[in-house]
Image (cartoon, rainbow, N blue to C red):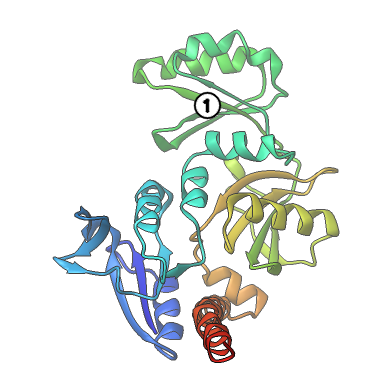
Amino acid sequence: MEICLISSKQKKKTDELLLEEAKKIANVKQIPISCISLLIDNGINFVYEYEDISKFDVILFRIPKSKYNLAAPILEALPEKAISIYSPKSFYIASSKLSLYQILSRFGINVPRVIFADDPQTGVFDLKLLRFPILIKVPTDKKKVMLANSQQEAKSMIDALQVLEQPMLFEEYYPEAKLIQVFVLGDEVLTALEKEPKEIDYAGGELKKIKPNRKIIKTALNVANILKTDYARVDILDTAEPIVVDVNLCPLLGDAIKISGINIPEKIISYAKAKFESKEKIPKLFDEVKTIFTESI
């Protein structure tokens, strides 16, 4: 079996752990996503330094969200024999909060209400439709996030950010809620970590292992099913009715492994191997049935 791990140029500890587990059962190659080109020639192949890498049996990803839109067409270009624990749809949807919330909301998953405005001044008039406090975000710069506790505060912040001439996203915020990070693989939850956010946008705070309730588990599995992904970290607010605030398809795993005591990279590689072997058995089974049928005539 040939495994390809597509990652960033700068290798992270999570990448090393995945490679370590993959090398136990297969030939492995790590390739930076920035070095991959899509070649259209009698179909589509993707190449790496002029080497066709569509030959790999299993494709895994460990990339930042800014590269999700590149991962999707790579998956679409894979030959039928190759497998992945993701789908192109999962990367397209998870690439932005707006698309993620739109799709999940359409399927009945609770998400924060948001307003997206190409002209922020236009959005000011609709802020009364949101529950305060709210987060004000510049989608093109993840570092530009502000917290407004009232409509007047929001207007002042929008006036200050107006010079950027960028669209803005206004999102309901739940500072009182605990954040649950649920790691989903296949049809099960591997582990769940809880934290009380110490910074805006649910950042900061110490993580601890918890046993998630049925609502949290059901929500996380439903989200993975909607995105057509076998693997994801689903971030859920533990409110009366769970609210999904993010989906990370390629999360860092250091804290999760340390706190949960679960070797998540080993679980991922074993799952991918089983999925590949299962796919391999189908044509073989078909050939066997065909042979039996032919011999009986």
Residue 195: in sight, yes or no?
no
Residue drawn at (35%, 64%) of the image: 7
In the displayed structure, 3 sits above or below 233; it is below
Could you say where residue 201 lies in the image, as x and y percent from the top left? 58, 41
Residue drawn at (65%, 40%) of the image: 104
Quadrant holding the N terminus: bottom left
- Secondary structure of the residue carrying tag 1 is strand
Residue designated by label 1: 169
Residue drawn at (57%, 11%) of the image: 124
In the depicted view, which residue is nearer to us: 116 or 29? 29
Residue 167 position by quadrant: top left
- Left or right, 214 with respect to 174, comes to right
In the depicted view, which residue is nearer to us: 292 or 50? 292
Query: As shown in the figure, which amino acid type bears the numbered disc 1?
Result: Leu
Could you say where residue 53 lies in the image, as x and y percent from the top left? 26, 69
Residue drawn at (53%, 86%) of the image: 294
Could you say where residue 85 lies in the image, as x and y percent from the top left? 51, 66
In the displayed structure, 49 sits above or below 57; it is above
In the displayed structure, 150 sits above or below 176; it is above
Could you say where residue 168 lies in the image, as x and y percent from the top left? 48, 23
Residue 56: in sight, yes or no?
yes
In the depicted view, which residue is nearer to us: 9 or 225? 225
Residue at the front extreme, as displayed = 297
In the depicted view, which residue is nearer to us: 34 or 80? 80
In the displayed structure, 251 sits above or below 146; it is below
